[in-house]
């Protein structure tokens, strides 16, 4: 029960933060050039002033800015994210339809980056100054320094176009009619390239953080005491060093989990992955204000949720935090 109070406090702050983000996003999106009514009529080949005025009135774009803002915030509080000009359906339905694909991609990439990064960081810390340490560090920095979109394009070119090992685009094989485990396997096959591309980019950060944290903790007095007691090096690294070294890694992972959604915009666009990142890209091109705002809001909510989860995990790893709070 001691942990319940701080969590409720964080949730209250999260709601206030989310409302502030919604207002700020509304200002930023409407400050961008372009008129959705003009875009829609232009695509229809009938960009006359009368039709543009009718569309603006239909979608409420002819109202004063403060009226639009007030209506938008009121709708957000009732979980009404508005209507998509371009898609012709409620924004919430659009996002809920695309969100599972994004969660599958980002969560897979997150666990790949975290597990691989921590494993390589631990391995590098046990071989400081040796060739293996330099090779592992260089391997991680190579992926971090490579632009995400370029790595995605090269992955498609090499593993899909040239070698034909993996599918390069889409969520699943169109028209295959797979069901059950067969469909799950097909989706997993399509997931490999985008998840690895996104995961390896963030893996380098966890690898370097794990390595530095392991080296720092290994110099602490309680570790020296454990060695003086005659404990084996494997036990010391697992029970004493690794557990304490994971604290900053968990903090960083919570902060960067939300950033994976931002990285998913490029990844989903290159791999034609039908998630909210690709939906946001399409909506930006179409000046679909409501959809853009909806995706921004859901992305912000995911970042805040990850931060709250990080707080809970942090308290479970280090119970001292609960006593300090």
Image (tube, grey):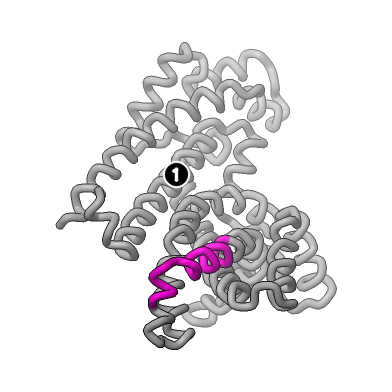
Q: Residue at x 39, y 76 (%)?
A: 225
Label 1 Cα neighbours within 10 Å, binned few <14 / some 14-19 / many ≥20: some
Can residue 71 be spotted in the picture? yes
Question: Extreme front residue here?
Answer: 228
Placement of 190 over or under 259, stated as above or below = below
Placement of 282 over or under 42, stated as above or below = below
Residue 115 percent location from the top left of the image: 53, 71
Can residue 194 be spotted in the picture? no
Choose between 280 and 192: the one closer to the eye.
192
Residue 58 percent location from the top left of the image: 49, 22
Magenta run includes residue 211: yes
Task: Identify the residue position indicated by label 1 in the image.
Answer: 298
Give the SS element for disc 1: helix
Q: Residue at x 37, y 27 (%)?
A: 73
- Left or right of 155 in this view: 241: left
Residue 288 percent location from the top left of the image: 57, 33
**Span of residues in magenta:** 209-225
Quadrant placement of the N terminus: bottom left
Choose between 167 and 59: the one closer to the eye.
167
Magenta run includes residue 276: no
Choose between 156 and 324: the one closer to the eye.
324
Placement of 66 over or under 256, stated as above or below = above
- Left or right of 133 in this view: 309: left
Q: Residue at x 60, y 39 (%)?
A: 283
């Amino acid at each position: 029960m001691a942990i319940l109070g701080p969590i409720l406090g964080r949730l209250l702050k999260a709601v206030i933060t989310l409302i502030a983000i919604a207002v700020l996003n509304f200002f930023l999106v409407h400050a961008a050039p372009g008129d959705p009514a003009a875009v829609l009529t232009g695509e229809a080949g009938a960009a006359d002033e009368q039709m543009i005025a009718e569309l603006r009135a239909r979608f409420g774009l002819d109202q004063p800015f403060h009226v639009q803002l007030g209506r938008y915030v009121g709708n957000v509080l009732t979980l009404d994210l508005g209507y998509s000009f371009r898609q012709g359906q409620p924004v919430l339905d659009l996002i809920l339809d695309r969100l599972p694909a994004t969660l599958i991609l980002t969560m897979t990439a997150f666990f790949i980056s975290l597990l691989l990064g921590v494993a390589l960081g631990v391995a590098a810390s046990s071989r400081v100054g040796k060739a293996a340490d330099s090779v592992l560090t260089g391997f991680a920095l190579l992926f971090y320094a490579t632009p995400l979109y370029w790595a995605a394009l090269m992955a498609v070119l090499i593993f899909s176009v040239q070698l034909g090992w993996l599918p390069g685009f889409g969520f699943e094989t169109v028209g295959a009619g797979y069901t059950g485990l067969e469909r799950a396997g097909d989706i997993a096959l399509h997931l490999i390239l985008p998840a690895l591309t996104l995961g390896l980019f963030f893996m380098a950060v966890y690898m370097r953080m794990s390595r530095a944290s392991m080296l720092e903790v290994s110099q602490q007095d309680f570790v020296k005491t454990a060695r003086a007691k005659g404990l084996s090096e494997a036990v010391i690294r697992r029970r004493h060093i690794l557990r304490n070294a994971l604290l900053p890694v968990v903090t960083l992972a919570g902060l960067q989990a939300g950033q994976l959604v931002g990285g998913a915009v490029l990844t989903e666009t290159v791999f034609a992955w039908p998630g909210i990142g690709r939906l946001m890209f399409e909506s930006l091109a179409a000046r679909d204000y409501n959809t853009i705002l909806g995706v921004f809001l859901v992305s912000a909510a995911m970042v805040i949720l990850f931060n709250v989860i990080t707080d809970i995990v942090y308290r479970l790893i280090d119970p001292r935090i609960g006593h300090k709070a």
